[in-house]
Amino acid sequence: MKTKTIITKSIGIILLFGLLSTNFGCAALFDAELDGQDIPRDENGMIDFKKLEEQVLEDFRNNQLVAYPQHFIETSGGFGLNSTEGDSETSFCIGAGYNHRISKDNFNTASYLKGFATHHSQSADDRKLNVTRVGAGYTLFDRASKNGKLDLTYGIDLSYGFGTLENFDFKEDLTEYRGELKVGANYSLSSKLDLGVTIPIASWSQQNYESDGFEFEQQNTWIGINKDNLIMGYARIKLD
């Protein structure tokens, strides 16, 4: 009986030392992961895992990835040269927009809704087109690098446009409904400024022309880049 008691106590002491060594080993590991920060503990001296999680996430934010902003504004511009029936044609587009994050920031992806306005102009020898578009869109940012500097972007834009078409001195009023699918990339230059580019995959538009009581409608579907679908460059200013 006495021998059994001694054996039981010995096992208890061994387990106790094992637990203590494991505890100190974990503490050393946490210290290494937290770059020397103190391990948060509760009033009983036990590890406070909730505070520890917050501490690890804060360290992750500060040292690994930059959080996606809640809001940002962007300015954009695009330029293109085309040839239509032997005539050279120049296209350019400028715009601005506001973006609001609708997803919870998990440092890997973020979804944004945006409102935007652009002005698109085409000019050829005997043809001039000017369209102002206002619309809304959705953009998904997807991390492409571990340091959080580079994102791939995927988006869809819907817009309403109005403007004029001049063709051989004949001027028509124009209204338009338009949808576009885009892919792109975004690079973070600093905590406040990103640069990006988008490339059109496909677009659809319905254009209505009117002049002197005469009206007609035209629908177009484009795949890829052309005079109506320009590669656009962006400067994105983070608000928070």
Image (cartoon, rainbow, N blue to C red):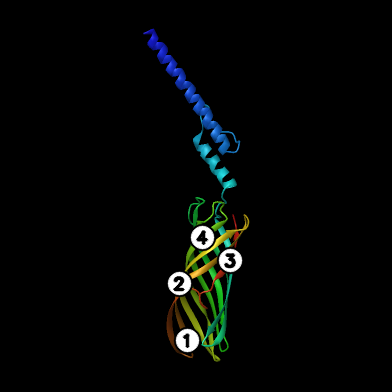
Q: Name the residue that disc number 4 marks.
A: 152
User: Alpha-carbon distance for marks 2 and 4?
Assistant: 18 Å
**Which quarter of the image is occupied by the N terminus?**
top left
Relative to residue 21, is residue 171 depicted above or below?
below
Counting from the top left corner in percent of width and height, residue 76 is at 58, 69
Is label 4 in a helix, a strand or a loop?
strand
Q: Earlier in the sequence, mark 4 or mark 3?
A: 4
Counting from the top left corner in percent of width and height, residue 196 is at 57, 64
Is label 2 in a helix, a strand or a loop?
strand
Q: Earlier in the sequence, mark 1 or mark 2?
A: 2
What amino acid type is highlighted by mark number 4?
Leu
Q: Name the residue that disc number 3 marks.
A: 234
Which of the two marks, 1 or 2, is nearer to us in this view? Answer: 2
- Asked if the residues shown at circle 3 and circle 2 are in contact, with their CB atoms under 8 angstroms apart, the answer is no
Relative to residue 18, is residue 114 depicted above or below?
below
Q: Name the residue that disc number 1 marks.
A: 210
What amino acid type is highlighted by mark number 3?
Tyr
- Asked if the residues shown at circle 1 and circle 4 are in contact, with their CB atoms under 8 angstroms apart, the answer is no
